[in-house]
Image (tube, grey):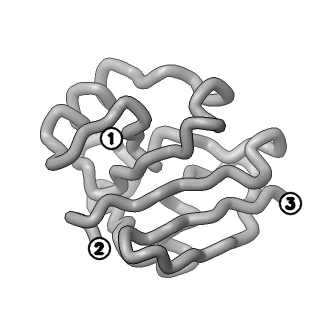
Amino acid sequence: MPHITYIESDGTTHRVEADAGRSLMQIAVEHAIPGILGDCGGACSCATCHAYVDTAWISRLPPRSESEAFMLEGVADLRENSRLCCQIRVQPDLDGMIVRLPAEQG
C-alpha cells in the first residue's frame, strides 16, 4: 500500500497509508489532515484541496487539466508545483510522495 506524507505549513508531518485509486484529497479528508477541506467533494470546482507536490514527484503526475488550472488561478500563493489534491489519484508508483500544504489553508 502506498504511503503519502502531508506536511502542514508549520512543519507538522502526517505519513498515511493510501489506497490506490483514491485521490490525495479523499485520503487527506479520511485521515483528518488539517488544511485539506475538499469542500466540493472532488469535483474540481473549488480550491480547498490546494497543495504543493514536492518537485521530485511532479514528473510522475499527469499535467493539470484546464479545469484544474482555472481553479488554481484563484489561490493565494500559486506555484509551479501547485495542484488540486482531488485531481491526483494515488498509484503504487507514488509511494513516498510528499505533499506540502499552504499556510492560508492551515
| Marked residue nearer the N-terminal end (3 or 2) | 3
Calculate the distance from the C-alpha at mark 3 to the C-alpha at mark 1: 26 Å
Quadrant of the image occupied by residue 9: bottom left
* Vertical comparison of 87 with 12: above or below: above
Q: Is residue 48 left or right of residue 25?
A: left
Calculate the distance from the C-alpha at mark 3 to the C-alpha at mark 2: 27 Å
Q: Are marks 3 and 1 in contact (CB under 8 Å)?
A: no
In this rendering, the count of numbered labels is: 3
Q: Is residue 62 left or right of residue 64?
A: right
Helix, strand or loop for disc 3: loop
Quadrant of the image occupied by residue 67: top left
User: Identity of the amino acid at label 1?
Assistant: Cys
* Vertical comparison of 35 with 57: above or below: below
Helix, strand or loop for disc 2: loop
- The residue that disc 3 covers is 1
Q: Position of residue 7 (x, y in %)?
A: 51, 67
Q: Is residue 57 left or right of residue 79?
A: right
| Marked residue nearer the N-terminal end (3 or 1) | 3
User: Identity of the amino acid at label 2?
Assistant: Gly
Q: Residues within 10 Å of mark 1 (few under 14, many from 20)?
A: many
Q: Please give the name of the residue rendered at 75% of the width and 68% of the height, measured from the top-left corner.
A: 17
- The residue that disc 2 covers is 106
Q: Please give the name of the residue rendered at 23% of the width and 48% of the height, measured from the top-left corner.
A: 46
